[in-house]
Image: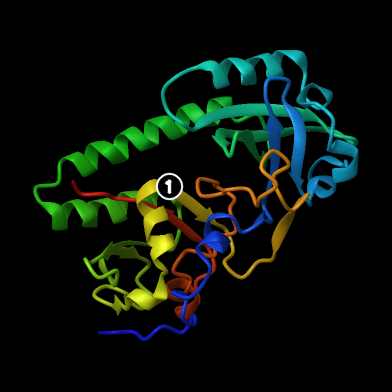
Amino acid sequence: MLLPSDTGTFENKNPDSICAPGSIQLYGILFVLQEPLLKIIQVSDNTFEAIGFYPREILGKFLDDFFCAEQVAGIKKTLSEEGESFKFLNLCIETRYSQGYFEGKLHRSDGAVILELERVATDRTRHSTDCDRALKKALDQIQKAQNLADLCQVAAEEVRKFIGFDRAIVYRFDEMGAGSVIAESKLENLSSLLGLYYPASDIPQAARRLFSENLVRFIPDVSDRTVPLIPSCNPLTSLPLDMSFQFFENGFSLPHSIPQKYGGRCEPDSELDRK
C-alpha cells in the first residue's frame, strides 16, 4: 500500500534547519562548552526547570561551577580518550534546590563540546549494568537469525522487549529514498503497519543522510514543544550549532507521519545498515 505524505512536502525544506534547528526536545538539557576550560557558551532555555538556574546565570561560567571537581576531571579524561565519538556518563548536579542525577552524553561539534543531560530518578550505575545484560541477551538472539528477513523480525521483537513500547518496526529505504515497513512487533490490539510504503517526499534527503550517520534518536513525544538554544548561534562560529548527532535534537527530520497517522506519540529510531 502506498501512503501519500500527510506531513507536507519536506524536500524544499532548508537542509540547515534539519542539521541545525536551534532547539532541542523538552525532556533534555544541553550545554555547549568551549575547551580547554569547559566554559559554558550556549545552553538550552529550560535549565531553570531542570536545575534551578536560568540561562543568564549559567552562560559565561564554567562546568566546575555546577559539577564537583571529581566529575569535571572525569569529563575531561573522557574527552581526551580516543575511540567512539560519543561518550556516556552518569553525573550528579547540586541544583539550586536539591541533588539531581543525570545521564550525560558527550561529543564534539563545530569546535565545541556538546554535553546533553537527561534527568533520572536515581544513580543509574547499577541500572546501566542491568541494561548491558539485557542488551547482550537481545544481541545474542539477533545474531542467531538465518537471513535478512529473520534478522529484521527478530530485531523488531527484541528492541520492543528492551524499550517496553507497544510497537517496534524496521523501516527500509529504497534507492529512490522511499521507504517501507519490512518487520514489526506490536501489541495484538494495534493495527499493523507491515508492508506499508511511504514516498520519498515524506523524509527529506538531508534527514535520510542523518539516518545513516546518527545511529540512535529518541523522541518521547513527537507533538511536544521544543526548547530553543541561548544564544541562537554558536559563539565560536557565529552560525547555528550543527546538531546532526544530538540525542535531544528536535527531531524534525524523522518520519513523524508514521506514528502520528496511527495515534503514536513516542518514537525511538535506530539505524540497521546492511553493508
Q: Position of residue 88 (x, y in %)?
A: 54, 30
Quadrant of the rendered image containing residue 4: bottom left
Q: Is residue 125 visible?
A: yes
Q: Is residue 183 visible?
A: no
- Which amino acid is tagged 1? Asn
Q: Which residue corresponds to the image point at 21% horizontal and 66% vertical from the top-left?
A: 175
Would residue 252 appear left or right of 185 to someone viewing this image?
right
165 above or below 158? below
Here the colouring is: rainbow
In the image, 99 versus 210, the foreground residue is 210
218 above or below 263? above
Would residue 111 appear left or right of 69 to someone viewing this image?
left
Q: How many marks?
A: 1
Q: Position of residue 140 (x, y in %)?
A: 24, 36
In the image, 35 versus 265, the foreground residue is 35
Residue identifier under label 1: 214
Would residue 16 appear left or right of 29 to someone viewing this image?
left
Q: Secondary structure at mark 1?
A: loop
Q: Position of residue 85 (x, y in %)?
A: 46, 31
Quadrant of the rendered image containing residue 17: bottom right
Q: Position of residue 264 (x, y in %)?
A: 50, 71
Q: Which residue corresponds to the image point at 29% horizontal and 69% vertical from the top-left?
A: 177
11 above or below 247? below
In the image, 13 versus 114, the foreground residue is 13
In the image, 227 versus 15, the foreground residue is 15
Single out the residue that lies furthest toward the left: 146
Q: Which residue corresponds to the image point at 46% horizontal and 81% vertical from the top-left?
A: 9
Q: Which residue corresponds to the image point at 65% horizontal and 52% vertical from the top-left?
A: 240
State which quarter of the image contains the N terminus.
Answer: bottom left
Disc 1 crowd rating (10 Å Cα; few below 14, some 14-19, many 20+) is some
